[in-house]
Image (tube, coloured by chain):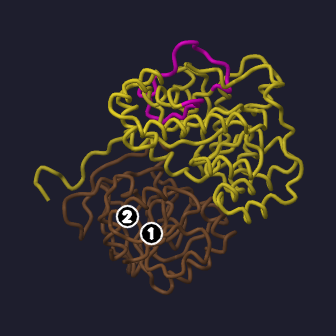
Amino acid sequence: MRRVGILALQGDVGEHRSVLDSLGADVVEVRRAGDLDGVDALVLPGGESTTIGLLMASSGLDEAIAKALAGGIPVLGTCAGMILLASEVVDGRHDQKSFSAIDMAVRRNGYGRQVASFETDLAVAGLEGGPVRAVFIRAPVVERVGPGVEVLARTSDGIPVVCREANATACSFHPELAGDARIHAMALDL
Amino acid sequence: MPEETPPQSERRFATPRVKRGLAEMLRGGVIMDVVTADQAKIAEDAGAVSVMALERVPADIRRDGGVARMSDPALIEAIQAAVTIPVMAKARIGHFAEAQVLQALEVDYIDESEVLTPADEAHHIDKWAFSVPFVCGATNLGEALRRISEGAAMIRSKGEAGTGNVVEAVRHLRSIIGDIRKLTQADSAEVYRWAKELAAPLDLVAEVAETGRLPVPLFCAGGLATPTDASLVMQLGAEAVFVGSGIFKSEDPQRRARAIVEATAHFTDAAIVAKVSRGLGTPMAGQDIAEIDIRLADRGW
């Protein structure tokens, strides 16, 4: 059974856990560096990226996760998790940290405040069984992707919303809020 | 893919899932009351997941008396401009015109709050009529389900705001969570009686009996003042915490705010809660519940 860690400092950890449970994964909530031992794949959940960033620094998880990502474990980041995987954060805080796992620039809250949050159906390349119900909550906008980045889905106006590079997949929406396990299965080899 | 399903369907805004979704993203976090843009920055720097924009914190509302109303839109806008995290603001119970203004300002959540003076003694706001999500206070399960039936997308305990005393928040959380636990044991005939006793819609009561949880996130508010207060209510089953007067009425708001953020994230790890609790300076003074003149938690119906 694959052991999957969820960064559990803040955010929608429970929704990710439900999805991973449905895929039969052995789920571990990660709150300190030692929790990463023996983890085969990692989820960076939705939440507030500034809060998660501060809590990762104080717990030493920033360095531990960077090391795990460099070691090539599969990782999926949704919303705040996408911001944490980006190489560049536009309009972020000056001390905003990210792991540069995917060569892309993201703008925090790029779709606007909560009144602009929405849900829609999206076709995602490589997924069978029809479109994904995509829930965007104060979501980040991907403004640039590097040449090595594969864009698996875009909005109707062409903005990339699912991006993959090497072992990392990032999603600006929340597949976990709709209970759809397919993106997790694809990104984490489950 | 079936032909009748287009690859890009229309965007749907303000669905229950979208409204509740933001509350899901705040889980495990701390929402802090702030009265200036500077305080909002301090809160964000300390790791707040959101700020509540107010003219006066509850302790001052309690001290000053008089009618407490929605904040000046200019203050709310200044706070929105100062931070990148979600900004909430309060409307009086039943005052849908204040809520309309807060929606026009595009606040991220509206708190229909007993901390302000109620504008309607029989009716809460019809929250389904709004695209901005609402949080409402509750002291028990029936009240929580009535607010959800009106469209609330998040419930918080009322506690007793502005006292620095966590006892009422604990009472409300224990009441809500304890009744949920009992309700899950009810047989189908008993569910009808529960609906009657709780004065709550049968479909919501049946849903809670089935799932063992509220249909929306349950946060804790009212009287929290220390990192251990946050740890306590999280262990009792709260999914996130609101801290009002407890931060900016203390000696060292910056450090206390940061400590409460750490304690909320690591609520089961007493070593971390101990570490962050050291040398925080004086907390807000606080009051015994028997000493206070007005019980804010009694407001709301």
Residue B137 included in the magenta stretch of the image: yes
Q: Which chain does the brown colour mark?
A: A
- Is any atom of residue B198 visible in this view? yes
Relative horizontal placement of residue B24, taking residue A23 as reference (left or right): right
**Secondary-structure class at tag 2:** helix
Which of the two residues, A99 or B228, is positioned nearer the viewer here?
A: B228
**Secondary-structure class at tag 1:** strand
Q: CA distance from mark 2 to mark 1?
A: 7 Å
The residue at which mark 2 appears reads as A21
Residue B96 included in the magenta stretch of the image: no
The mark that comes first in sequence, 2 or 1, is 2
Q: Which chain does the yellow colour mark?
A: B
Tag shown at residue B179: none
- Is any atom of residue B53 visible in this view? no
Residue at (46% x, 56% y) in the render? A14
**Segment tinted magenta in the rendering:** B114-140
Q: Amino acid at mark 1?
A: Val
The residue at which mark 1 appears reads as A27
Residue at (46% x, 59% y) in the render? A79
Relative horizontal placement of residue B97, taking residue A176 as reference (left or right): right
Indicate whether B139 appears above or below B84.
above
